[in-house]
Structure formats: C-alpha cells, structure tokens
Amino acid sequence: MEEVLVNKFTTQAGGVWAEVVLNRPERKNAITGPLGIGLAESINALNADDQVQAIMLRGEGGAFCSGLDLGAFNATPEPDWLADFQTIWRGAHKALFQCNKPIVGAMQRYAINGGAALAVACDYLVVGEQSFVQVGEVQIGMAAPYNLAWLNLRYSEAVIAEVVLLGDRLNGADMLRLGLANQSVDDDQVLQTATAICERFADFPSGAPAKIKQGMRARLGQTADQWFDLHTAATAGTRVKPQSMK
C-alpha cells in the first residue's frame, strides 16, 4: 500500500489543485521512512507542476498524524530505512519549505509531535473544534527541531512558549487564539472547508498564489538546510530515540 497518495482536482472554472494524503489509517498516519519519502516526492512533483495552484495536506481515515510510528522504529529486525531516517525526514521538510504553492492543512482529530510539525508547516490550517495539536517532545526529552523551525518561521516567542514549553494539548479554540489555525470549524466540516479554500486558490490567475508565497518567504534570506540546521544545532544533545508519551 502506498503510504502517501496524490489526487488532483479541477474546479468548474478550470483551476487545478491537488491533495497529498498521508495514507496509513491503520496506524493513525504515523510517520515512517517510506511515508517521509512519499511525502517529499509528492510535494516536489506537485511544486514542479505548473497547472497546480494549491496543495491540501491531510490524513486518511479521519486523523491527521499521530507522530512517529514507535512500533516501526523499535521493530526487530530494524527496518531498512531506519539508518537513513534523519535524511529522509529532512527531505520531507525541505520539500514543504521549498514548495512555492500554498499548502492548506486539513487537520482532523490530532497532530502530535512529528505530526504537529507537518500541521504547522502548512501555510493555511483548518482544524476541527474538537481536534488538538500537541508538541510534547519536552515531556519525553526528545528533540523538536522541525516543530521549532516552523514555529520560529511563523510566530512570536510568546506563542512558541505556550506551544512547546509544557507540551500540552491545544484544542481548536486554543489554536485559533494563538494563530496556529486560520479556521476552526465543526469537525465534520474540516475537509469541506479546506477544499473550498483550495478551490479559491485554484481559480486565481495562473501562478499568482505561487508568486505571493515566494514574496512572503523572501524576507527569510536562508535556504531550507540553513534554517533547519540552525534548529537542529540548537536542540543537539537532547534524547532522540523515539519513546511513547507518558
């Protein structure tokens, strides 16, 4: 089974948008090496597709992403991809960082730790009122470089502190209050709302959303690797072996 799926859609006006679907519903779309590879390949391919104006990122089966698949990471024998996972996961985040197309997150139920980083990476995030995000690495002594990198890209230190220092769950209302989410809607309306936003992007003049996003990111003046290396170095020395949340 493909761990990441891509679907393209055409609006009535002829605009094109696509969705990237984390496709491990039996594991709540938990992260593995193959999922990271599939995510990078899918985002890079859609970014190179001149027809596509926007990308929706969502999880299959009614949940966004539960974080690292601890069973896979601790399996015996070790999976072939384990030794390369840091490179794989960097590649996925580089693809998201370098994507010129607006990425609309449709966050259902929850986005936890590594899954939270994917939600925060979205340019526009729609969440369910009963859903929650949790950047809980502090509670288990793990590094959180990608969560911190995306949060530092978008938010103030005060907001970041509320998200990461205690590592508690933040529901839809909390996310809206902090600016992590652009919209918080009834849980059964998340996909419909995110779809409507993607359709709006798709029907804008060709290339306009990409040009605006490039202008937004121009202020940074750093490559993806430079930005992520900064946060990887800052969190060096924290425990990195995946463990379950207490």
Image (tube, rainbow, N blue to C red):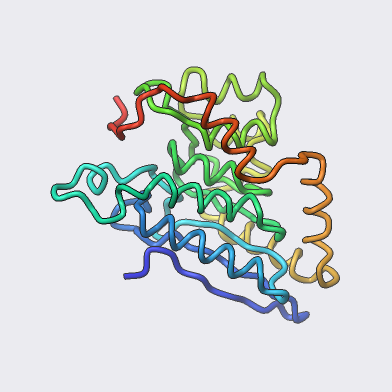
The C terminus sits in image quarter: top left
The answer to whether residue 56 is left or right of residue 133 is right
Q: Position of residue 121 (x, y in %)?
A: 60, 45
What residue lies at 46% left-to-right and 28% top-to-bottom?
169
Q: Closer to the camera, 19 or 85? A: 85
Compared to 42, does 140 lie above or below? above
Q: Quadrant of residue 114?
A: top left
What residue lies at 51% left-to-right and 53% top-to-bottom?
92
Q: Position of residue 32 (x, y in %)?
A: 34, 52
Q: Position of residue 104 (x, y in %)?
A: 64, 55
Q: Quadrant of residue 120?
A: top right
Q: Closer to the camera, 41 or 1? A: 41
Compared to 15, does 221 lie above or below? above
The answer to whether residue 230 is left or right of residue 156 is left
Q: Closer to the camera, 231 or 179? A: 231
Compared to 42, does 133 lie above or below? above
Residue furthest left in the image: 76
Number of marks in picture: 0
The N terminus sits in image quarter: bottom left
What residue lies at 36% left-to-right and 69% top-to-bottom?
2
Q: Position of residue 61 (x, y in %)?
A: 39, 59
The answer to whether residue 93 is left or right of residue 226 is left
What residue lies at 41% left-to-right and 44% top-to-bottom?
86
